[in-house]
Image (cartoon, rainbow, N blue to C red):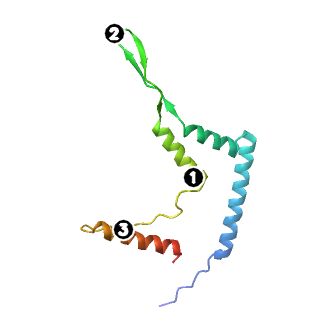
Amino acid sequence: MAKKKEEKPLMSEKEKERVGASALTSARAHIEEACRKSGLTVEKVATTVVKAMEATRVIAQLDFKNGTFVYSNEMEDHSIRLKAVERAEDLLDLRPTEKIKVGVLDGMSDADIDRRLNELTKKGSDGK
């Protein structure tokens, strides 16, 4: 039986990293240029997110007797506020960078689950 000739990769891992970093830098420059041309700034985004975090709404209902609308008092719009908080988390990089898969078996007590989560979290934060 003939030995299979071992194929060399087209690029080394170091070359792949360099090319990837270069592509990311180039893409970022194009995005920044497009934002600059359109007038989109970090300040505008932040201002809009903060305004959305204070969003309110008014509900209108038709009064069939009088044929007019009855309006509620201004209320907090929780769905828009929550989306704004999620955007703020993204902008401020407050979300975890890594998701941890946790397997929970039937019959595990809360203490067992907490202990397992602590083990996984500690392992992830130590970089091991």
Give the amino acid type for the residue marked by disc 3 in the picture. Asp
| Picture residue at 61% right of the left edge, 51% below the top | 91
Q: Which residue is mark 1?
A: 90
Amino acid beneath label 2: Lys
Closer to the observer: label 3 or label 2?
3
Amino acid type at image mark 1: Asp
| x, y percent for residue 99 | 47, 63
The tag on residue 65 is 2
Mark 2 packing: few (<14 Cα in 10 Å), some, or many (20+)? few
Q: Residue furthest bottom?
A: 1
**In this view, which residue lies farthest toward the left?**
107
Q: Is residue 59 above or below residue 3?
A: above
Determine the residue positioned at 47% across, 73% down. 122
Q: Is residue 123 above or below residue 36?
A: below
Q: Position of residue 101 (x, y in %)?
A: 41, 66
Q: Nearer the viewer, residue 31 or 69?
A: 69
In the rendered image, which residue does mark 3 sit on? 114
Task: Answer above or below: position of 30 versus 64.
Answer: below
The front one of 4 and 70 is 70
- At label 3, counting other C-alpha atoms closer than 10 Å, the crowd grade (few under 14, some 14-19, many 20 or more) is few
Q: Give the alpha-carbon distance from disc 1 to disc 2, as whole Å.
A: 48 Å
Find the distance from the CA under tag 3 to the CA under tag 1: 27 Å
Q: How many numbered marks does the figure carry? A: 3
Which element carries disc 2, helix, strand or loop?
A: loop
- At label 1, counting other C-alpha atoms closer than 10 Å, the crowd grade (few under 14, some 14-19, many 20 or more) is few
